[in-house]
Amino acid sequence: MLPYSGINVNATLKIQLILIFCVCIFVIYISVNHSFNISKIADSTISESPASLAPGISSCSSRYELPEITSLLSPLSGTDEGIFDILRLIGELTDCTRCSVYEVQVTPKVVKRKFFWAKSGADGGKDVFHNSNMKMFPWIFSNIKNKKSIYVHDIESVKEETPDIKLLQTQVNNSFVVMPLLDKSDVFGFIFIEDSQKIVSLEKEPYDLIFLSEILRLAIVQKKFLDEISLFKNLINRSNDYIIVIDRNTSKVIDVNETLCAHTGYSKSEFISMESESLMDIVGNFWSGAFFETCGSSYLDVDSSFKAKDGTKTPVEINVTFIAHDESEYVLAVARNIVERKEREMLLQKIRDRVELALNGADLGMWDWDVATDELVFNARWAEMLGYHAANLPPNFKAIVKMIHEQERDEVISVFRSIKQQSPFFEEEFRINTRNNESKWLLVRGKATEFDGEGKVSRLTGTAMDITERKLSEDHLKQYADKLQRSNEMKELFTDILRHDLLNPAGAIKGYTELLLEIENNERKKTMLERIQKSDDKLIDMIDTAAKFAKLESQEELEFSVMDLGDLLCNVTESLRPMFESKKMEVIMRFSGAHNSSVNHIVEEVFANFLTNAVKYSSENTSIFIDIFDDSGMWKVAVSDQGEGIADADKPYVFDRFKRVTKKGVKGTGLGLAIVKRIAELHKGDVGVENNPDGKGSRFWIMLKKA
Ligand code: ADP
């Protein structure tokens, strides 16, 4: 017997015992009396007799000989044909028109005709009880329930007014017999015999009918049992899981399902004849005594594998049950193919690894907090930030809160408390005292990912970044900015000193020197006074330029208005006319029309500087040319001279502060072009120098936006 659960092992044994019992009873009676007699318990019209065979047997005059009984028993293989054969015998015995077997189904609670025989020539008749509910036949079913047979000789003469009698009177010709069918003590159906010609004699001596009905009952029970087995066999064979049963004592396979055979490529007979070593090679040693000793009557092996005939291995999860039965021990294994699960797990692991890599790449700690249980899940980097090894960090948020610097703790708690469904994101920077008593700055960002029924946060997920270095840099930067601020203030103070405190005495020197020059007649003293005057002029120029530069340096932006660059150039040129005349120089404007640009008046300083330098660094009787070009959507104002020019190596530096190329014979501070550059910057423009394209000398230019 297979120890499969659900298979009614006892039922088979019982059938066998019943068969043996029946055969013995009949053999004994046939050999002793050659006849049966069953006591009559009925009136002339309707009689009810017990359906069970044994209690009513008292004497016998059977029409069946032993070989016939044996042949009757042979159909007990429980086939439809066998059952029909017995039904035919009942039909012949009772000389009836029709003989049917009805089964009472439990769900749905209806009666169904399962087997049917009709006398040759007779029509099929009506399926009287077809799909009817028990309630529709109260009289008949109350008898069946009480396990009593019913003999009705003349349907018309039945006086009962029950609905079933009324119905049967319209459906059945004359007489009928109903015999209940039992499995153990439960009624599972009944035999319905219509219009028997021998109903009177059968009722008097019903033993043959009872005998045949008993044989029929056994055949049906056996068929039901075989159907059940075949259903289970089918289910087991078609199960997605691999099922294997092993006798633990012999280590031999007793049974395997088709799924296992199909998957491994071994047939059932190959499995059954397999030596235990080969079997172990294929399915592992899950039935070994060691497991039984340690795991008890069942265990689950979640990480095993089955090897197919072609050598391929399939990961399986085996559920093993040890079963003791009939002094034998069996091992039932139900294994599940977990290839897909493993693949999914691997995919998940890959995704996790990638996320972890990305988090590592970004140097991020990851945490996930179940607010209700205070359970905290985190990655190794998060633990490391707090000075822990992943295995040692307390996995709850309360412990983390304690580590937050007390100056920021309340703020962090209130931020967490303020997270709502409408604003689930948060970001907070705070210090934490690590396990090693280090103070670290963390930037924690996250989102509430789950809420309870009342809308309260139940889960928060986020990242953490160690921003200690950034915070230190910020501190340094702040200190530096403070320093710069202080030095800027110093510069402004110095500029003020330049402008007022130095310029005023220099101006006084200038005035007194001029007065002295007017009244002084001594030539030597005059020459000395003139030198003082020159030096003082130079000093005033220097103070003026330096103050201007300092002011422009600290200025962030200028106010602009639309002006014609040509007009500005004419104004500046006009104001510098005495200078040109002193060196007999000519200024030629090579542009016409309006050249509107959004500029500040200070741009005149640029033109003045270009023109002053053109005079300063050119010989007498040379010319200065002023052009305005349209260059890439901007105005390019260029001042070209015929002076000494600037070497290519020096060109990149002439706009840098204090980088005068040569001091020879020239007055100046070296700040002029630096001021030009700054003014150009404030105008979001550009400046440059190139060789005068028309010949000797240089060309200084500034680019200004068109308006
Ligand atoms: P400064 O003229 O007061 O020395 P600038 O900043 O105006 O200072 O000029 C920087 C230097 O660029 C000058 O010293 C000079 O060597 C050179 N430079 C400027 N303009 C010209 C020019 N038109 N021709 C030749 N060299 C020039």
Image (cartoon, helix red, strand yellow):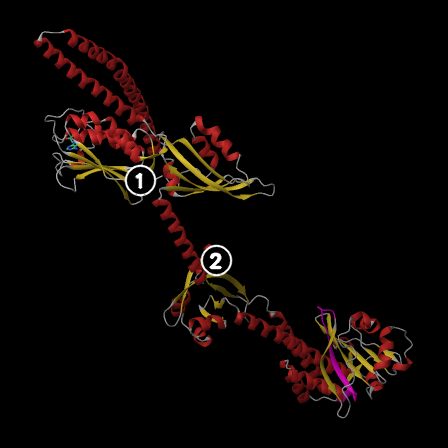
- Give the amino acid at mark 1: Gly
Quadrant into which the N terminus falls: bottom right
Observer-nearest of 663 and 431: 663
Residue 154 location (% of width, % of height) = 88, 83
Q: Look at the picture and state if 283 lies above or below 200.
A: above
Which secondary structure, mark 1?
loop
Q: Is residue 103 magenta?
A: yes
Residue 657 location (% of width, % of height) = 20, 29
Residue positioned most to the bottom: 121
Observer-nearest of 362 and 282: 362
Residue at figure coordinates x 56%, y 70% from the top left: 235
Residue at figure coordinates x 46%, y 70% from the top left: 260
- The mark total stands at 2
The answer to whether one can see residue 660 in this image is no
Q: Which residues are magenta?
A: 92-109
Around disc 1, counting alpha carbons within 10 Å, would you say few (fewer than 14), some (14 to 19), or many (20 or more)? few
**Residue position for label 2:** 300
Which secondary structure, mark 2?
strand
**Residue position for label 1:** 593
Residue 299 location (% of width, % of height) = 49, 57
Q: Is residue 44 magenta?
A: no
- Give the amino acid at mark 2: Leu
